[in-house]
Image (cartoon, helix red, strand yellow):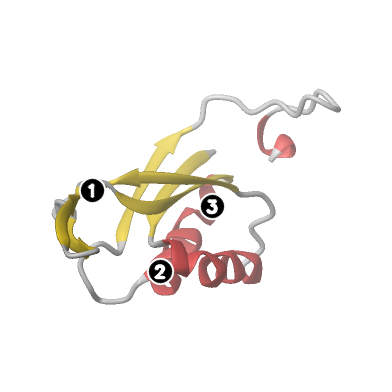
Amino acid sequence: MKLITAVIKPFKLDDVREALADIGVQGITVTEVKGFGRQKGHTELYRGAEYVVDFLPKIKLEIAIATAMVDSTVEAITKAAATGKIGDGKIFISSLDEVIRIRTGETGEDAI
């Protein structure tokens, strides 16, 4: 089992959600986050004053999936979230030792 964590641009959330639903991903956790990578933020003008926005709004997706679905899930996220511009985001893949469904007590891939 794997945990895929993806950080994407906020306006790409619906596209990514639809792409994941199309390949059969059943559960996803979405969090609004702020951060920066190589972008290092940007400068904006507000009422004639210039200020620096250090942390840009992003969406963090967390998806627990069976190992067999990793490649198709990463491909779906990559295609749906890509704009070709800086700040498209990142995907992190980590191993899950165990998953337990609280309601039924199911464990492992049955709990996903």
Q: Dot 1 surroundings within 10 Å: few (below 14), some, or many (20 or more)?
A: some
Question: Percent position (x, y) of residue 34?
Answer: 35, 45
Q: Is residue 80 above or below residue 4?
A: below
Q: Which label's residue is closer to the chain start, 2 or 1?
A: 1
Q: Which residue is mark 1?
A: 36
Q: Which label's residue is closer to the chain start, 3 or 1?
A: 1
Mark 2–mark 1 Cα distance, whole angstroms, equals: 17 Å
Say which mark, if any, is on residue 110: none
Q: Which residue is mark 2?
A: 81
Mark 2–mark 3 Cα distance, whole angstroms, equals: 22 Å
Q: Nearer the viewer, mark 2 or mark 3?
A: 2
Q: Nearer the viewer, mark 3 or mark 1?
A: 1
* Type of the residue with mark 2: Ala
Question: Percent position (x, y) of residue 112?
Answer: 68, 41
> Which of the 4 image quadrants contains residue 81?
bottom left
| Residue at (30% x, 64% y) in the render | 88
Labels 3 and 1 touching (C-beta < 8 A): no
Q: Give the left or right position of residue 48, taking residue 94 as reference.
A: left
Q: Dot 2 surroundings within 10 Å: few (below 14), some, or many (20 or more)?
A: many
Q: Is residue 59 above or below residue 106?
A: below
The outermost residue toward the bottom is 84
Query: Who is closer to the viewer here, 31 or 105?
Result: 31
> Which of the 4 image quadrants contains residue 19?
bottom right
Q: Nearer the viewer, mark 2 or mark 1?
A: 1
| Residue at (16% x, 59% y) in the render | 49
Q: Is residue 24 above or below residue 64?
A: below
The outermost residue toward the front is 47
Question: Percent position (x, y) of residue 9?
Answer: 38, 62
Q: Which residue is mark 3?
A: 68
* Type of the residue with mark 1: Phe
Task: Tell me the quarter of the image containing the N terminus.
Answer: top right
Labels 2 and 1 touching (C-beta < 8 A): no
